[in-house]
Image: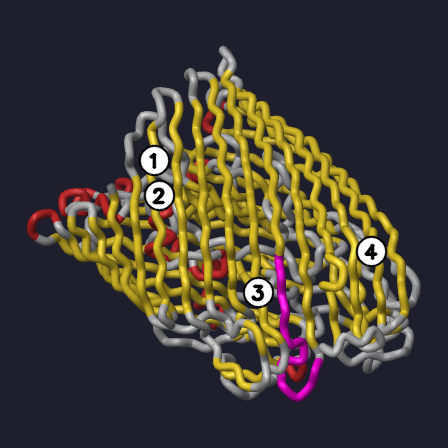
């Protein structure tokens, strides 16, 4: 009966709702415009050209900057409540972002992410330094499924494109200023201004700042920061357009992200998640610089030559109580810097004609530097015999060539063929002192892969678009950190083959648009951490010898009926591991346990049939608003948003007694906006029911999601 109800819900979403792509801005909504409003066409740029989302064979959600504000999405954590099929588990220094159950489940520098996040066109830090706020944003595009035949990095789970607003040549001195105050003594200010410099040159300066008191009450002799937020960001963009053919866009970001701390306690604690004990220093501070230069040159035949160059630097400092109580002295601390150099070249055909195509080449160098004396696990007294200390560098390299060609056939059909060859290398120049034993780690691992995509699309008529495709994605292998038993073997790459079909439609004269898709993933060589074969209390990463099957469907809809609009998204997912034997490192065993053959025992567990981690069976998001017209063109707009992420497993072992089951998340939010000319005053509240939920599980600790927050924002557009 439950399954029938879920499929009925999917059918209803196909007929009504509003997806996360409403292009109408709050400040421009007059009474007359509201009465005549229709669903705006949504443009997606992920394929390196501007195409209509409704005629692009990708399962995607697109959020404008105004959508982010209306939905209360200010950081990456909150995307999961506005996008079907996505889960985001924030455990402090790192974030596990998974789409359709694929992304990142093992958090270390060696395990790359299957969901690539791009900021202004460059692939950014893979899992760390992800709390950059969304301010002065043009759009966020969330693509589901393997990506890589038209863009820099390869991805197994999906890709997220975050694009800030560009300067406008000839755009005058336009911009905005927005301030907010709220509970927990929250105060924030952000804004942007377009600066015309000449007929061919313009700049845009934007900034963001926020301070907020901690959500936590921490008892015990702890030191440091209890979780007070102190955040400052600034971005400068410069656009030079000397003629119609050439465009050079420069952007540089600086971010100071002092999250204070990410306090946590043991997974099975019975106390409230915000009332914990600790006897360790707390710290969580990220700093970053990103510079991007994008150059476009359009040849006389309409072909575009594009270069995207990126440099990124970040430093992350983290200190925590690793046992999560004041009863023991097990701590963790690290200070890591990361540098990323990337270069992408594209050759892009005109968007019209019988054949269109994009070809590209990509190179990225990513290096972690673990500073001496800063990465330490163990007793705080600093004894070399009670700690595990690591220092050194981990350089990684990725090089790729890719391309995609589309053949526009008669009767609205289109055939797309894409391919990508990737070559990756990772190296450890690391020294470890494990409980007084020095270990030198000088290893390298290399992976190469060809992945591709074949898609058949059919534009039935201007209101109906169908597609079916097969696509593959690739994630490189990596190196295991030594644990005193010699240098462990590397783990290999993983590969996903996805089969997907979708239907995108429009109804009721442009007032309603829908997307619905179904997918099946054949997931091979899944990278997973289990008990080290000869010393299972340590984690060891290897590949699942049997394929994992993940399949499901998603539905989105967007609708505007005059003054009333609403949006909805739904995701259903089922996952199942093949035969795979492993020792849970939390319980351990000295007996033999071969991943492929076992034998099965109380400690050598057969994981066949278990679910994929971070893969909830059901996700749902919904939002609705109504614009009440007032005298003199003013308006009042109440809006409600709801996001549900179902229960999920944080470990393949599915051991409830050890806290592997993460409960569902039901986040209800609302806002009430008054628009008066260029001014908008908004009362807002997130997590209205004040659900205290576990936002992530890592290292035997539970990390809380944000509690109820409320306040008022005042926006001035000029």
Quadrant for the C terminus in the image: top left
| Quarter location, residue 462 | top left
Local crowd at mark 2 within 10 Å, few (<14), some, or many (≥20)?
many
Find the distance from the CA under tag 4 to the CA under tag 3: 24 Å
Residue 298 in the image: above or below residue 177 = above
Decide if residue 99 is in sight here: no
Q: Residue at coordinates 22% horizontally, 44% vertically from top-left?
A: 28
State the residue position of label 2.
192
Q: Are marks 1 and 4 in contact (CB under 8 Å)?
A: no
Find the distance from the CA under tag 1 to the CA under tag 3: 33 Å
Q: Which mark is residue 364?
A: none
State the residue position of label 1.
194
Q: Which mark is residue 284?
A: 3
User: Residue 685's x, y, as percent?
Assistant: 32, 67
Looking at marks 4 and 3 on the same chain, the residue that comes earlier in the sequence is marked by 3
Q: Residue at coordinates 75% horizontally, 65% vertically from top-left?
A: 529
Residue 226 in the image: above or below residue 549 = below
Local crowd at mark 3 within 10 Å, few (<14), some, or many (≥20)?
many
User: Residue 413's x, y, as percent?
Assistant: 50, 29
Q: Nearer the viewer, residue 571 or 78?
A: 78
Q: Residue at coordinates 83% horizontally, 76% vertically from top-left?
A: 604
- Which range of residues does the magenta coloring cover? 316-329
Local crowd at mark 1 within 10 Å, few (<14), some, or many (≥20)?
many
User: Residue 662's x, y, as percent?
Assistant: 57, 74
Q: Are marks 2 and 1 in contact (CB under 8 Å)?
A: yes
Residue 348 counted in the magenta span: no
Looking at marks 2 and 4 on the same chain, the residue that comes earlier in the sequence is marked by 2
Find the distance from the CA under tag 2 to the CA under tag 1: 7 Å
Residue 279 in the image: above or below residue 436 = below
State the residue position of label 4.
430
Looking at marks 3 and 2 on the same chain, the residue that comes earlier in the sequence is marked by 2
Tag 4's secondary structure?
strand
């Amino acid at each position: 009966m439950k399954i029938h109800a879920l499929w009925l819900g999917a059918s209803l979403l196909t007929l009504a709702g509003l997806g996360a792509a409403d292009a109408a801005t709050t400040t421009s909504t007059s009474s007359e415009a509201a009465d005549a409003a229709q669903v705006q066409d949504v443009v997606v740029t992920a394929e390196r050209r501007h195409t209509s989302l409704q005629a692009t064979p990708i399962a995607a959600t697109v959020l404008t900057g105004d959508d982010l504000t209306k939905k209360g999405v200010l950081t990456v954590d909150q995307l999961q409540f506005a996008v079907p099929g996505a889960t985001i588990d924030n455990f402090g220094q790192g974030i596990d972002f998974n789409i359709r159950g694929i992304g990142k489940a093992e958090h270390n520098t060696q395990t790359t992410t299957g969901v690539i996040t791009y900021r202004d066109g460059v692939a950014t830090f893979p899992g760390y330094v992800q709390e950059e706020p969304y301010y002065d944003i043009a759009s966020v595009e969330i693509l589901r499924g393997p990506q890589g035949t038209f863009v820099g990095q390869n991805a197994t789970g999906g890709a997220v494109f975050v694009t800030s607003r560009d300067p406008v040549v000839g755009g005058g001195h336009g911009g905005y200023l927005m301030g907010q105050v709220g509970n927990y003594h929250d105060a924030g200010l952000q804004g942007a201004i377009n600066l015309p410099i000449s007929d061919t040159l313009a700049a845009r300066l934007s900034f963001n700042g926020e301070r907020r008191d901690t959500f936590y009450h921490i008892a015990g002799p702890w030191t440091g920061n209890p979780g007070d937020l102190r955040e400052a960001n600034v971005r400068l963009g410069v656009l030079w357009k000397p003629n119609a053919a050439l465009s050079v866009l420069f952007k540089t970001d600086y971010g100071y992200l002092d999250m204070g701390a990410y306090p946590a306690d043991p997974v099975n604690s019975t106390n409230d998640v915000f009332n914990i004990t600790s006897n360790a220093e707390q710290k969580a501070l990220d700093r970053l610089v990103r510079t991007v230069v994008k150059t476009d040159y359009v040849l006389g035949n309409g072909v575009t030559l594009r270069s995207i160059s990126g440099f990124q630097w970040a430093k992350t400092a983290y200190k925590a109580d690793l046992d999560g109580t004041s009863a023991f002295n097990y701590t963790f601390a690290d200070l890591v810097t990361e540098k990323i150099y990337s270069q992408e070249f594209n050759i892009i055909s005109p968007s019209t004609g019988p054949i269109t195509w994009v070809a590209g080449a990509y190179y990225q160098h990513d290096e972690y530097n673990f500073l001496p004396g800063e990465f330490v696990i163990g007793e705080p007294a600093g004894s070399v015999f009670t700690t595990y200390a690591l220092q050194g560098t981990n350089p990684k390299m990725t090089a790729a060539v890719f391309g995609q060609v589309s053949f526009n056939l008669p009767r609205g059909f289109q055939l797309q063929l894409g391919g990508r060859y990737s070559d990756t290398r990772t190296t450890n120049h690391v020294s470890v002192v494990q409980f007084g034993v020095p270990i030198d780690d000088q290893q390298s691992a290399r992976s190469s892969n060809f992945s591709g995509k074949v898609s058949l699309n059919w534009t039935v008529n201007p209101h109906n678009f169908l597609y079916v495709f097969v696509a593959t994605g690739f994630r490189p292998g990596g190196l295991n950190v030594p644990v005193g038993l010699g240098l462990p073997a590397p783990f290999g790459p993983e590969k996903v083959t996805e089969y997907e079909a979708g239907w995108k439609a429009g109804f009721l004269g442009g007032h309603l648009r829908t997307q619905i898709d179904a997918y099946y993933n054949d997931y091979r060589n899944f990278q997973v951490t289990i008990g080290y074969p000869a010393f299972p209390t340590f984690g060891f990463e290897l590949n699942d010898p049997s394929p994992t099957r993940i399949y499901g469907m998603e539905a989105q809809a967007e609708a505007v009926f005059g003054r009333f609009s609403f949006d909805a998204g739904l995701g259903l997912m089922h996952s199942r591991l093949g035969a795979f034997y492993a020792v849970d490192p939390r319980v351990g065993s000295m007996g033999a346990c071969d991943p492929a053959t076992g034998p099965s025992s109380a400690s050598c567990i057969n994981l066949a049939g278990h679910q994929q981690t971070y893969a909830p069976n059901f996700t749902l998001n919904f939002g609705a608003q109504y614009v009440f017209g007032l005298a003199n063109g003013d308006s009042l707009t109440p809006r409600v948003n709801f996001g549900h992420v179902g229960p999920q497993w944080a470990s393949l072992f599915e051991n409830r007694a050890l806290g592997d089951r993460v409960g569902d998340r039901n986040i209800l939010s609302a806002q009430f906006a008054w628009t008066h000319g260029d001014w908008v005053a908004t009362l807002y509240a997130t997590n209205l029911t004040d659900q205290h939920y576990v936002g992530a599980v890592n290292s035997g600790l539970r990390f809380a999601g944000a509690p109820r927050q409320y306040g008022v924002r005042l926006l001035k557009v000029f």
